Amino acid sequence: MKPFPWDNVMKFGLGTLGLAPGDFWTMTPRELSAAYDAIVQNSQSKAPIVRHELTGLMARFPDEENEK
């Protein structure tokens, strides 16, 4: 049996999620797994935005004239 990958889990929780150590250590394995799945699935399932989608978003949410 392989040992539990604590180094990778801590890098994910403290680094990727940016959790404070106390918050990381109070998470349940199920909570940490859900956070991992959300990040991994979102990064793998989202295709890059295509030009017509970007154009539509720009039309719906134009930059304000007063922005500097």
Image: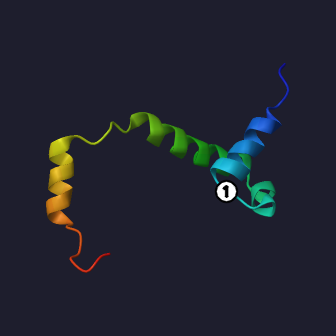
Who's the residue at 74% across and 40% down the image?
A: 9
- Which color scheme does this rendered protein use? rainbow
Q: Quadrant of the N terminus?
A: top right
Looking at the image, residue 15 sits to the left or right of residue 65; the answer is right
Which residue is most to the front? 68
Who's the residue at 19% across and 59% down the image?
A: 58
Image coordinates for residue 33, horizontal then vertical, percent: 64, 43
Which residue is most to the top? 1
Of 49 and 6, nearer the camera is 49
Q: Which residue is mark 1?
A: 18
Within the image, what quadrant is residue 36 found in? top right
* Res 30 seen here: no
Who's the residue at 64% across and 48% down the image?
A: 16
Who's the residue at 75% across and 62% down the image?
A: 20
Say few, some or many: other residues with alpha carbon within 10 Å of mark 1 (under 14 / 14 to 19 / 20 or more).
few
* Res 16 seen here: yes
Image coordinates for residue 45, horizontal then vertical, percent: 40, 35
Which element is circle 1 on? loop
Of 57 and 25, nearer the camera is 57
Looking at the image, residue 48 sits to the left or right of residue 40; the answer is left
In the image, what residue type sits under mark 1? Gly
**55 lies above or below 37:** below
Q: Quadrant of the C terminus?
A: bottom left
Number of marks in the rendered image: 1
Looking at the image, residue 54 sits to the left or right of residue 10; the answer is left
Looking at the image, residue 29 sits to the left or right of residue 62; the answer is right
Image coordinates for residue 39, horizontal then vertical, percent: 53, 44
**52 lies above or below 27:** above
